[in-house]
Amino acid sequence: MIKSPLQIARESYSPKLPKALNGSVKLVDGKNTESVADQDDIKKLFPNTYGMPVITFEEGESSATTEAIGVGLILSGGQAPGGHNVISGIYDGLKKLNPANKVYGFLGGPGGLVDNDYLELTDEIINHYRNTGGFDIIGSGRTKLEETAQFDQGLENCKALGIKALVIIGGDDSNTNACVLAEYYKQKDSGVQVIGCPKTIDGDLKNEMIETSFGFDTACKVYSELIGNIQRDANSAKKYWHFIKLMGRSASHIGLECALQTQPNVTIISEEVEAKNMSLDQVVEDIAQVVAKRAAKGENFGTVLIPEGLVEFIPAMKKLIAELNDLLAENEKEVNTLETNSEKRGYLTAKLSAEMAEVFKSLPNGIANQLMLDRDPHGNVQVSLIETEKLLIDMVKAKLKKMKKAGEYTGKFSSQGHFFGYEGRCAAPSNFDADYCYSLGYTASVLIAEGKTGYMASVRNLTKPADQWLAGGVPVTMMMNMEKRHGHMKPVIQKALVLLDGAPFKALVAKREDWAENTKYVYPGPIQYFGPTEVCDLPTKTLIEESK
């Protein structure tokens, strides 16, 4: 492996740990839990892993096993900065318990478990990947584990390798898979534990016990650097409006965090759009009014931050997508036999409700075609392929043309569209994520040694110095509810949306009008790995606001 000077320097970085993880660990049980919603349904589906207590780690006498065991690791779903540190934390924790413990990485995601495609991880391999970005140590994948044949084959493969525990490192859907797998293996008394780790740069896997998902900090800092660079360019050339779409299919956490870091002129928050029952035209009207106000001051430039999943939060579009999801699931063969997009649009329009058929027909053909694209493995529309930024540019341009004719706008409108997604997913983790991920991995190793299953590693109190962080475990069933997927109700981890009464959103609202009309840009610059703590180790502004 060819290493950059930064990677060589980062190898020597020793991630910080919560105080309780530096010595012998005692587990303290909290109150028994229940699911966040649909308690009867979730309890019925998970009788063996439902209602377990939240666990907190403290310094004290440990009851962990020192028997040599094998542990399998799976990276699931999209990449997020810090995954390699989760793995190194698990590895170091297990080796500290017993140097004879073996750690296996299943290659290419959950599919590697079923296909028995694996790599035994060693000191030499692990040391090459400490504090680096990406998931390339073992690769990731989006295979969904949902069939008993997959579970049984995975179990057979684990037993052949002497694996007593699996750690699934992933987002809400991946950890839902982990919960289903834990329940199945517990029901069969298989002797294989399943532990989850909370990963997603989108930030929508969070609750009182999971303050943030790993990778969110790094990704937002990468995007904020890019936004800051663009804003400095805009403020220099003074001739472009930049419409920037940001990762975040199901929630606007990234957009909100990046706004707090960079202070753009317009930030669209999908959850607010839905709460206000706004139409696409109303969103466009709001942007156009900001453009006009700035033009009146001679400032024909600006930035607009757009969440990736915006179209799913516009009430009419959300209803349309829900109907399309059901139709595409029920009529997959018929739709796939049609050769042109025009034929597919006509076929689906005829089957939609009258109200949604009108909405579907009103969309530009390009957007309508994108809404018909194949769903992802979890049944979701692939919103990253919908060019929302270009749609908004075109609609704002048309709105401004009308306003100019009416004498309501006298400026010039030139635009650039951007989508920041892959740019942030594999960045070298910030010090915060390097520490947080290593702590999550180490926490997972303790949960394994204590014989736990159906738990997600939890590290809290994250605005404090790392030695004051609180490690433990939270039952995955505690986070679950029932949702419609592929036309059927299924148990899934409830997504965490931006709270409109929460401190981070209120902080944006308090400054929004000022940032809209006035150029108050902040230029965060690149992630700093070496230097003063106040520069290098800061958590996100979201966490800071939430802790006030």
Image (cartoon, rainbow, N blue to C red):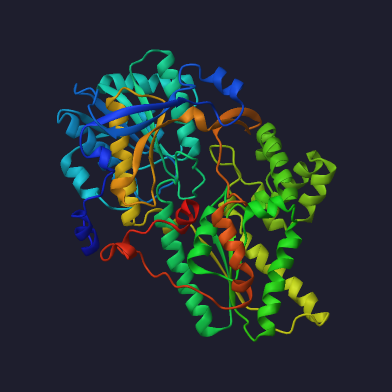
**Residue 435 visible somewhere in the drawing:** yes
Up/down of 385 relative to 291, above or below = above
Q: How many badges with numbers are in the image?
A: 0
- Residue ID at (43%, 67%): 225
Say which residue appears at 45% left-offset and 23% top-offset: 52
Q: What residue sits 21% from the left and 38% below the top? A: 92
Name the foreground residue: 126 vs 211.
Answer: 211
- The part of the image, by quadrant, that contains residue 455 is top left
**Left or right: 3 as drawn, with respect to 230:** left
Residue 335 point in image, percent of width and height: 69, 39
Which percent across, then down, holds residue 447? 32, 29
Q: Is residue 307 visible?
A: no
Say left or right for 539 vs 288.
Answer: left
Quarter of the view holding residue 40: top right
Q: Nearer the viewer, residue 166 or 383?
A: 166
- Residue 432: image location, x then y, percent: 34, 54
Q: Residue furthest bottom?
A: 298
The answer to whether residue 263 is left or right of residue 184 is right
Between 173 and 67, the residue placed more toward the observer is 67
